[in-house]
Amino acid sequence: MNRCWTLMDAPSTSDRATAHTGTGSAAARPYRHPEKRLRPDNPSPRKPPWIRVKAPTSKAYAETRRIVREHGLATVCEEAGCPNIGECWAQRHATMMIMGEICTRACAFCNVATGKPGALDPSEPENVGKAVAKLGLAHVVITSVDRDDLEDGGASHFVETVGWIRAYAPATTVELLTPDFLRKPGALEIVLAAKPDVFNHNLETVPGLYGAVRPGARYYHSVRLLERAKELAPGLFTKSGMMVGLGETREEVAQTMDDLRCADVDFLTIGQYLQPTSKHHPVDRFVAPEEFEAYAALARAKGFLLVSASPLTRSSYHADSDFAKLKAARG
Ligand code: SF4
């Protein structure tokens, strides 16, 4: 029988990530985040009923997991402990996370491990292409850890991955959810040369919280990245996402929407922040479903082609059907 779970009960690490942390027990999870070990605990408030999701038990879920493992791939669905994994993987919608499982940044909201990443796996781009073909995806989202250690921030690896997806699954549309490529001149141009169908980069939060939530990033650099993507490829769909419940105000959310519209971003996603461990940024509050509806209405009024806003909305949630809606909206 299915049971409900919340994010903290979810299998937040893949088998491979479990191996590198040494154990998969909840108590050991902070070791994924050595920089957060000495921080005081931030107990998460009790989750409201609308955050509950079903445990993954379907055959299709198991098959997706098998294909991901067989190709030695990491997914953000597992690494971030996404609550939607049961639903998405039952439809074979896995979001690949390339360039390893270790990130060079240490964002206060993120469950991906922080540290010094290893060398890039040269077989990974082709393995992603094979897995996408086996999963039979109409639309795939490819994301990555931040690789500040690489000269191009990993842009060429994205391009290679797109090339192999097009070789093995030519009908699949590709959405790239990239890091900010801060201090990586030319990286965005490299990525756009691969002609992704959607360019996605998440602002994650409002500018006033960047110091606490995304200390290694710069808000206006991220906005400018999205703006430049549209300038360089005017026909491209651009997309960005943010979390609420981190301590932002409604006015700040509205201002962030305006900044994204100034950057000509087409699609906005807004979801509830969930705290991966007690060492992460505290949940300020759980935003009620009707407040998400109000945010969606506000964003639509500001001119986004498409808005997805709900407690469980994530950047790649329903990305395939949303891509179809995006095309229809532009048409
Ligand atoms: S919402 Fe995105 S990250 Fe979460 S399970 Fe679905 S595809 Fe994966």
Image: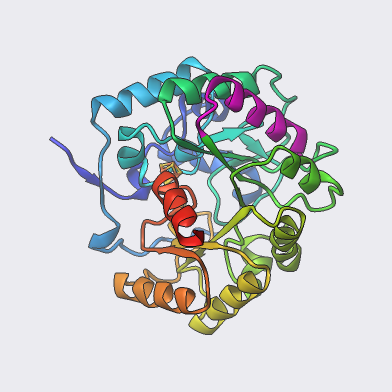
Query: Percent from the top left, x then y, of residue 170?
Result: 55, 26
Query: Percent from the top left, x then y, of residue 149?
Result: 80, 38
Residue 206 part of the magenta segment: no
- The image quadrant where one finds ligand 1 is top left
Judging from the image, the colouring scheme is rainbow
Question: Which residue is at the front of the view, 33 or 300?
Answer: 300
Res. 275 in view: no
Q: Determine whether, in the image, residue 64 is placed left or right of residue 105.
A: left
Q: Residue furthest left?
A: 1
Query: Percent from the top left, x then y, of residue 319?
Result: 45, 47
Residue sitting at x 56%, y 63%: 266
Residue 307, image quadrant: bottom left
Residue 161 part of the magenta segment: yes
Quadrant of the drawing holding the N terminus: top left
The region drawn magenta spans 153-172
Question: Which residue is at the front of the view, 203 or 35?
Answer: 203
219 w.r.t. 128: above or below: below
Residue sitting at x 48%, y 74%: 299
269 w.r.t. 141: above or below: below
Number of numbered discs present?
A: 0
Query: Percent from the top left, x then y, of residue 20?
Result: 57, 26
Q: Residue furthest front?
A: 331
Q: Determine whether, in the image, residue 212 is placed left or right of residue 134.
A: right
Residue sitting at x 58%, y 26%: 165
Give the overall secondary structure of the magenta segment: helix
Res. 29 in view: yes
323 w.r.t. 299: above or below: above
Residue sitting at x 76%, y 33%: 156
